[in-house]
């Protein structure tokens, strides 16, 4: 990106450049591109965990057990993610933001391509499972390291009365990434024979993820290494701080922020990854047709995210998050009945679930990050997101499938209800702390 000549007229004009206005829309483009690429990787692996990995990597056990094993490996990335954040924050402090982002996305692309080339259990035995687990951990480390601070810059640089609108823009990467991933798998499953799909067809989405990462890397680097963006980041103190110092000063706000988003993150895999495994294992329905239904659900989620921006700018982000948590709590009461009803019931489960997910997720990121202040916001926002994913979403497919297979579908309702309660409790604690201060 070329800067305006007046902004870089002289190396002695640093102060003038630091206060140059940056259009929020320009930041938003970088945020959406970056998040879409990350979520595409995320969902390609998640869908494969439900539909591919039990057959390719765990053929020595029954299909249900193989899926539970695959979901256990799926969770590894979320466990590794906070460690990746800490490691790459150190890299940024030691070198630069551009170096950190390049290394993280290179690692992410390498791990993703590694999965694409990985032989199955029938070729190399247990080594295939070990390598799959290793690549999954590396994906998590890389995703933690890919935090570029652009969402925080967007939130702070947006007009105060429109922060809800600009906050939701980065969240659009989730449904867009899911729509592309689900559509690609639906096409491959419907176009190839079962033998061809499991032999080589499932690998194509991982190749596509690698290519998208390359495009996203250059799109994001174009922003984060530009002088005006670097200066604005410095002006707003969006720089990494040592993790130990962050937790000493603001540790409770990391936990509050993670639980404030819990309803949304719990919902995330209950409507995307878990139902795919349930349809595959316990029904006779077409998986490709169900994926197409989920694509339409993704479109509803995108609409819900956009709507959340309008609502948040009128009633506040915390109230929007609390209201959607109440909606998810209500949904949890009849979600098991819908999923078990077949046909129309499953359609309503998916479409209504995606709509609620969009409304909630649109404001889930950074709703309480103002608690960190300027000094700790950069690292605090990243680790809050990591912890939210870990406690809310990492084990959702594993826990939901295990409990529902053993005890019945009502347990997904309890899982969603617990997330909603966690969100409402965290928002209540946050409000109490703010009133005391």
Image (cartoon, grey):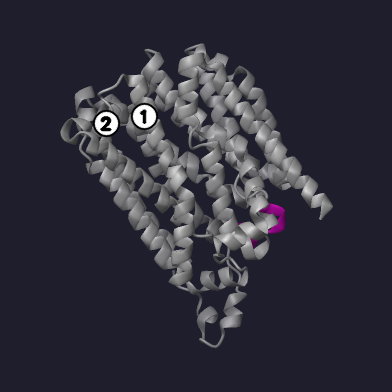
User: Can residue 161 be seen from the camera position used here?
Assistant: yes
> Answer yes or no: do the residues labelled 2 and 1 have beta carbons within 8 Å?
yes
Who is closer to the viewer here, 121 or 8? 121
Q: Which residues are magenta?
A: 154-163
Mark 2 lies on residue? 57
Q: Secondary structure at mark 1?
A: helix
User: Can residue 358 be seen from the camera position used here?
Assistant: no
Rendered location of residue 181, percent (x, y): 38, 37
The answer to whether residue 349 is left or right of residue 50 is right
Magenta stretch prevailing secondary structure? helix
Rendered location of residue 292, percent (x, y): 41, 27
**Image quarter of residue 217:** bottom left
Residue 268 among magenta residues: no
Residue at x-position 64% and y-position 59%:
248
Mark 1 lies on residue? 69
The answer to whether residue 251 is left or right of residue 32 is right
Residue at x-position 74% and y-position 46%:
430
CA distance separating discs 2 and 1: 9 Å
**Image quarter of residue 243:** bottom right
């Amino acid at each position: 990106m070329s800067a305006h000549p007046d902004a870089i007229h002289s190396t002695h004009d640093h102060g003038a450049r630091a206060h140059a206005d940056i259009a929020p829309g320009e930041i938003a483009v970088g945020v959406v591109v970056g998040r879409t690429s990350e979520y595409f990787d995320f969902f390609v692996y998640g869908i494969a965990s439900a539909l591919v990995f039990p057959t390719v990597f765990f053929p020595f056990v029954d299909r249900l057990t193989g899926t539970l094993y695959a979901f256990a490996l799926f969770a590894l990335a979320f466990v590794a993610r906070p460690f990746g954040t800490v490691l790459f924050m150190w890299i940024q402090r030691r070198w630069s933001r551009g170096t950190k982002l390049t290394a993280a996305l290179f690692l992410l692309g390498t791990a993703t391509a590694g999965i694409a080339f990985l032989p199955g259990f029938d070729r190399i035995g247990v080594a295939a499972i070990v390598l799959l687990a290793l690549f999954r951990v590396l994906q998590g480390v890389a995703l933690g390291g890919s935090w570029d601070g652009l969402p925080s810059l967007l939130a702070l640089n947006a007009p105060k009365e429109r922060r809800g609108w600009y906050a939701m823009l980065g969240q659009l990467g989730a449904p867009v990434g899911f729509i592309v991933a689900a559509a690609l798998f639906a096409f491959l499953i419907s176009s190839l024979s079962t033998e061809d799909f499991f032999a080589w067809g499932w690998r194509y989405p991982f190749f596509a993820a690698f290519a998208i990462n390359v495009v996203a890397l250059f799109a994001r680097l174009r922003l984060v290494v530009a002088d005006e963006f670097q200066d604005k980041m410095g002006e707003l103190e969006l720089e990494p701080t040592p993790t130990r110092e962050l937790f000493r000063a603001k540790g409770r706000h990391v936990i509050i922020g993670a639980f404030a988003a819990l309803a949304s993150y719990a919902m995330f895999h209950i409507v995307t990854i878990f139902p795919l495994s349930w349809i595959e294992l316990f029904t006779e329905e077409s998986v490709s047709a169900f994926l197409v239904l989920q694509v339409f659900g993704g479109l509803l989620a995108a609409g819900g995210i956009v709507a959340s921006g309008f609502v948040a700018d009128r009633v506040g982000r915390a109230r929007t998050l609390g209201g959607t948590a109440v909606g998810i709590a209500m949904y949890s009461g009849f979600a098991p009945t819908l999923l078990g009803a077949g046909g129309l019931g499953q359609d309503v489960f998916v479409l209504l679930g995606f709509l609620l997910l969009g409304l909630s997720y649109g404001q889930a990121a950074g709703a309480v990050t103002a608690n960190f202040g300027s000094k700790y916001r950069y690292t605090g926002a990243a680790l809050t997101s990591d912890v939210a994913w870990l406690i809310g979403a990492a084990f959702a497919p594993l826990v939901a499938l295990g409990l529902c297979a053993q005890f019945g579908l009502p347990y997904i309702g309890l899982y969603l209800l617990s997330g909603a309660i966690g969100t409402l409790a965290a928002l209540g604690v946050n409000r109490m702390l703010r009133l005391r201060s």
